[in-house]
Image (tube, rainbow, N blue to C red):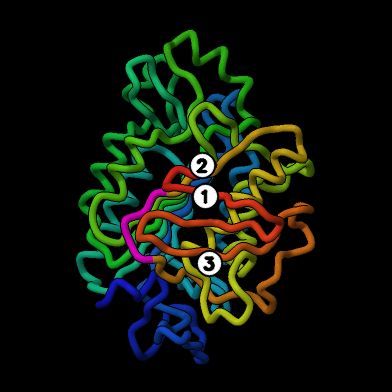
Amino acid sequence: MSMGNALLNSKSGGTGTGEDTQTKTGMGITFPSDHNYALLIGVGKHSNPNWSLPVTVNDVYALHHLLVDPKRCGYPPHPPNMRMLVNEMATGHAILSSLQDLADYAANDSEANLLIYYTGHGWLDASGRYFLIPHDAQIENLAETALSADRFIEALRVIHSQRLLVILDTCHAEGMATAKEISLHGFHPHAVPEAVASTIVRGTSRAVFSSCLGEESSWILPDQSLSVFTHHLLEAFNGAGTPAGARHVTIANLMAHIGPSVEATAARLGKSQHPFFKFEAEAFPVALPGRSNEPSDSRPEGVHTSRTQNFHGEVGIYSEGGGDIHIDHWGRRG
């Protein structure tokens, strides 16, 4: 299968969605698709109430709703193609077990395309080791009960799929009250480090999106409904930032919208947040655009539809308002 095919490539015949009508893009990609698999993790309620992040469950359900829409992404809505781990279900063991399941599905489906989404805490220890914080992580033994980047990467390494998109919305501002508590144990909140993301994307057709850089926070919308990052991620999947008339939304289109839109929304809140992106793939499609490719009414003022160029790992973003903004693998302005 050529690298130009995507997370949304389908075998002919029936689908797990129960939809009889299928839609094809200009690249021959068919919606819905039995080859799409997603694992959506929202830690939400934590065993330590001080670490709970309720908005992450909203994020997961909102993304699930979009992914299973046959007019957008066409993921079959039930296991094995779709699995959600929220609140008490989002334990370290359940996450690793679900990742192994994905590896097994991919091994038996030569056209498998995977999306893994995690929204919750991400912490760095004094030695530079990075951890995702599942529901059952314990402060007294965090190094053993949290999910280390090494274990997460190892679980991803055995997954051999046509496409793999990993989306990490970590370092939530809503949970910053925990910073003092965890600092006493040698940890501090941190977005996924560059070295971790670089390791995840080693291989063919892999991409990593992170909600923010370094010690920045991932901010929440004023109405507490979604994180700023996931709000704009959903807009991008629906076609905001995709050129009018395009037959599909690609990962380059996602980046073109998410980067400047998150920055603009955070700035309106008086905050700073810069998403970053890392990928080793062509700009493969991930969705069909919505009824309009124009930005939604909720898009921040002053952020215009962007044009993108794919450089197999870099995306150039050119603002219609003048000036040249280049976003490299890591979303930094240059």
Viewer-side residue, 311 vs 239: 311
The disc, 2 or 1, on the residue closer to the chain's N-terminal end is 1
**Residue 171 sits in which quadrant?**
top right
Relative to 194, 89 lies left or right: right
The disc, 2 or 3, on the residue closer to the chain's N-terminal end is 3
Q: Mark 3 points at which residue?
A: 67
Q: Name the residue under label 2.
A: 334
For residue 77, the mark is: none
Q: Is residue 43 visible?
A: no
Q: Is the Cβ of the residue at disc 2 closer than 8 Å to that at disc 1?
A: yes
- Please give the range of residues in magenta: 278-282
Q: Name the residue under label 1.
A: 326
Q: Could you tell me how far apart the alpha carbons at marks 2 and 1 are, in whole angstroms?
A: 6 Å
In reply to whether residue 49 is colored magenta, the answer given is: no
Residue extending furthest front? 323
In this rendering, the count of numbered labels is 3
Q: Could you tell me how far apart the alpha carbons at marks 1 and 3 are, in whole angstroms?
A: 29 Å
Secondary structure under badge 3?
helix
User: Measured from the top left, where is residue 205 in percent x and y?
Assistant: 30, 61
